[in-house]
Amino acid sequence: MRIKRSVTRFFGNLVIPAVSAAAISYFGYYALWGTRGLMALADVKARLAVEQERLDTLSDQRARLEKRISLLQSGSEDPDLLEEVARSQMVGSTAGQVVIRRNQN
């Protein structure tokens, strides 16, 4: 009887710390090297910086396009921009090319 109690007490005193140590080790490992751990944080920050730079580039491009659209809207046409758009749509036109209009008699 006495041996049975000491064996039960021994395993009882050993099992709880062993299970606790295993749980702490498991969660500690994933807190550091898991998919959302501290080591993955550096990778996420680097990807965020790249995407932020891409967003800034796209925002600048959008602002430029919105400015061009506002210049082409009726009532406030910019003659230089209209000429640029017309030249880009003409076949075979290049920058610096001069267009001479003929009178249609």
Image (cartoon, rainbow, N blue to C red):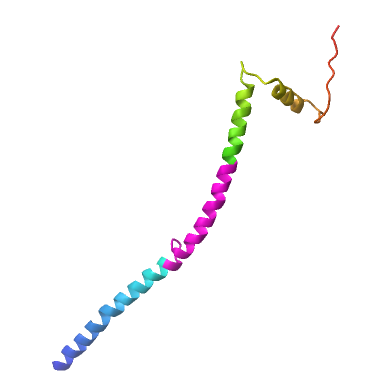
Residue 86, percent from left and from top: 74, 23
Q: Is residue 100 above or below residue 35?
A: above
Of the 4 image quadrants, the one containing the N terminus is bottom left
Residue 50, percent from left and from top: 57, 51
Residue 74, percent from left and from top: 61, 17
Residue ID at (59%, 38%): 60
The residue lying toward the viewer, choosing from 80 and 38, is 80
Report the residue that reaches farthest toward the left. Answer: 1
Residue ID at (78%, 25%): 90
The residue lying toward the viewer, choosing from 96 and 19, is 96
Q: Quadrant of residue 10?
A: bottom left
- By secondary structure, the bulk of the magenta-drawn segment is best described as helix
Q: Is residue 29 left or right of residue 104?
A: left
Q: Is residue 98 left or right of residue 69?
A: right
Of the 4 image quadrants, the one containing the C terminus is top right
Q: Tell me the magenta residue range.
A: 32-57
Q: Is residue 12 left or right of residue 84?
A: left
| Magenta stretch: includes residue 85 | no
Q: Is residue 42 left or right of residue 57?
A: left
